[in-house]
């Protein structure tokens, strides 16, 4: 992720080295190590393993794997649907 692509609130949290307080934000995660922001987490860590994602989301590795599989199914359906038009 490029610094220019980060929203201003994420940049502000990184600059001030403080955790985000906007728990209503869809990018908010309960993980102070990355200023409670999934975008900051991606910015600092880049690609992450499913285990790292599970740790940040405070859910099991199995659950992260289930979510990944469902997302991939949806993407494949979407790609196949778009190609048939």
Image (cartoon, rainbow, N blue to C red):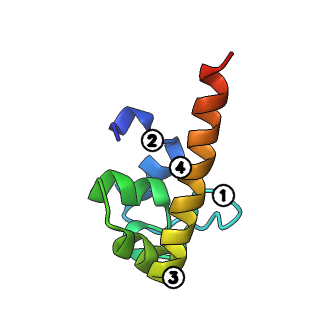
Residue 75 placement: quadrant: top right
Residue carrying label 4 = 9
Q: Is residue 23 left or right of residue 53?
A: right
Q: Are marks 1 and 4 in contact (CB under 8 Å)?
A: yes
> Quadrant location of the N terminus?
top left
What is the CA distance from the residue labelled 3 to the residue labelled 1? 17 Å
Q: How many marks?
A: 4
- Earlier sequence position, callout 1 versus callout 2: 2
User: Disc 1 vs disc 4: which is toward the camera?
Assistant: 1
For label 4, the SS is helix
Q: Is label 3 or label 2 in front?
A: 3
Pointer 3 with pointer 1, Cβ within 8 A: no
Could you say which quadrant of the image residue 5 lies in?
A: top left
Contact between marks 4 and 2 (CB within 8 A): the answer is no
Residue 28 drawn at (x, y percent): 58, 63
> In the image shown, does 39 or 64 lie closer to the viewer?
64
Residue at x 48%, y 70% (from the top left corner)? 65
- Which mark is first along the chain, 2 or 3? 2
Of the residues tagged 4 and 2, which is closer to the observer? Answer: 2
Q: Secondary structure at mark 1?
A: loop
Q: Earlier in the sequence, mark 3 or mark 4?
A: 4
Where disc 3 sits, the SS reads loop
Q: CA distance from mark 1 to mark 4?
A: 10 Å
Q: In the picture provided, is 60 more to the left or to the right than 77?
A: left
Which residue lies under the disc numbered 1? 25
Q: Residues within 10 Å of mark 2 (few under 14, many from 20)?
A: some
| Rendered residue at 42%/70% (across/down) | 53
Tell me the distance, in whole angstroms, between the alpha carbons under discs 3 and 2: 24 Å
The residue beneath circle 3 is: 58
Residue corresponding to mark 2? 6
């Amino acid at each position: 992720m490029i610094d220019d692509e980060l929203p201003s609130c994420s940049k502000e949290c990184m600059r001030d080295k403080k955790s985000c307080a906007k728990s209503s934000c869809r990018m908010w995660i309960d993980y102070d190590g990355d200023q409670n922001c999934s975008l900051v987490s991606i910015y600092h860590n880049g690609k992450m393993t499913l285990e790292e994602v599970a740790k940040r989301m405070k859910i099991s590795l199995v659950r992260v794997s289930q979510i990944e599989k469902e997302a991939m199914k949806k993407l494949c359906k979407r790609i196949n649907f778009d190609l048939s038009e």
